[in-house]
Amino acid sequence: MPRRPGGQCAVMERVRTSPAHPHVPAASESELAHLVLMATYAPSVHNTQPWQFETLSDGLLLRADRSRQLAVTDPYGRDLAMSCGAAVHHLQVAARAIGLDTEVTLFPHDGQPDDLAHVRVLRGAPATEPEVEAAVAILHRHTHRGRFPSEQVSGELVEQLRTAVELQHGMLRVVHPDEMVEVEVLVSQSEQALVQTDGYAAELDQWVWTAGQDGRRPDGLPADAVDHGVDRAESLQGRQFGRTGPVRSGEPPVPEHPTVVLLTTLADEPGDWVQAGRALSALLLAATAGHALAQPIGQVVDVPQTRWAMQRLLGTVGIPQMLLRLGSGDSLPQTPRRAVSDVRTPAP
């Protein structure tokens, strides 16, 4: 079991997007509300959105919302921490797009492991065009579970994704075609292990919409968001949210050509999980800007045995944090998001 942050601050990391300007007022109330809104568009496991933001005099404090942690799938909170890390990165990208700088301290309070990040917000230089475009990608990014029928993403885009990940202290490993069969076996084994785990099916049911809930829930996954379609020939099986497997009509399956990548970090402490979420956010936004869709294959890293087997198989120096398929396909609408008023505590 990973060590949890305890008596002393487990991780202290400060990141600035551009030089701070002393003696300049912090963000306004409307600006902070905008940043939280943009942070809520971050990806989260099963769209649980397990975060809470507290308004501070100099910015925002992000706390983990343990009531939304997946007790069966994510008993140690790794997926939760990655989700919150992605929200932090989304917030930083959104801040830079409106001329604000951010300074992030991870685990800012001793003995408070649910206080994941203090984001200090400062006045900065006007945003550049690429910084605005990065924030626009937040509004278009979504998890894709449909087909990837076109060619693999370009080598140029892969290098852009690698750079984006490395800027967030992560690493990106492309899975080569001759490694795919063994990776597929590990994904299948992880899916079987989870399906056989007590409470797993009920936990999935809790976060997938049932009939009559359309438009009524601000979280979870609508049925069409987890529908893998019929006659799939996908190179990797995504997480199966339904009680039945992929539908077959008897027609020949449509070939798919995704690029498969593995996101890793050097270590595997809670701070690394938050940082992995920031790296994942950077990867997904860069992919969106490059007109690529992404599907996390989370189950293979949710099961410890297959996670470590993946590391041995691919010979990675880093610890596997997320496997993803990348490619192009028909876009689907974003999943719903909780209101800012539900996830933010205003200043007293």
Image (cartoon, rainbow, N blue to C red):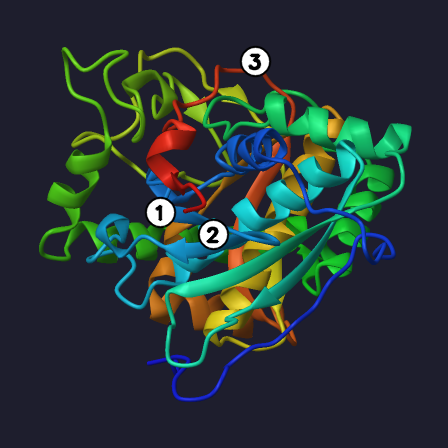
The structure residue drawn at horizontal position 32% and vertical position 56%, both measured from the top left corner, is: 189
Task: Measuring from the top left, give residue 81's x and y in whole percent.
Answer: 44, 59
Of 214 and 14, nearer the camera is: 14
Task: Measuring from the top left, give residue 130's x and y in whole percent.
Answer: 86, 32
N-term mark: 3 or 2:
2
How dense is the environment of label 3, judged by Cα within 10 Å: few (below 14), some, or many (20 and up)?
few
- Provide the residue designation for mark 3: 330
Task: Measuring from the top left, give residue 244's x and y in whole percent.
Answer: 19, 29
Residue 85's place in the image compared with 42, above or below, is: below
Instruction: Report helix, strand or loop for mark 1.
Output: loop
Alpha carbon separation for disc pair 1 and 3:
28 Å
N-term mark: 2 or 1:
1
Task: Measuring from the top left, give residue 58's x and y in whole percent.
Answer: 62, 54
> Mark 2 and 1 residues: CB-CB less than 8 Å, in contact?
yes
> Would residue 4 be found to the left or right of residue 33 on screen?
left
Type of the residue with mark 1: Pro
> Mark 1 and 3 residues: CB-CB less than 8 Å, in contact?
no
Residue 47: in sight, yes or no? no
The quadrant holding residue 339 is: top left
- Provide the residue designation for mark 2: 84
- Provide the residue designation for mark 1: 50
How dense is the environment of label 1, judged by Cα within 10 Å: few (below 14), some, or many (20 and up)?
many
> Would residue 90 be found to the left or right of residue 75 on screen?
right
The quadrant holding residue 262 is: bottom right
The structure residue drawn at horizontal position 65% and vertical position 76%, both measured from the top left corner, is: 317
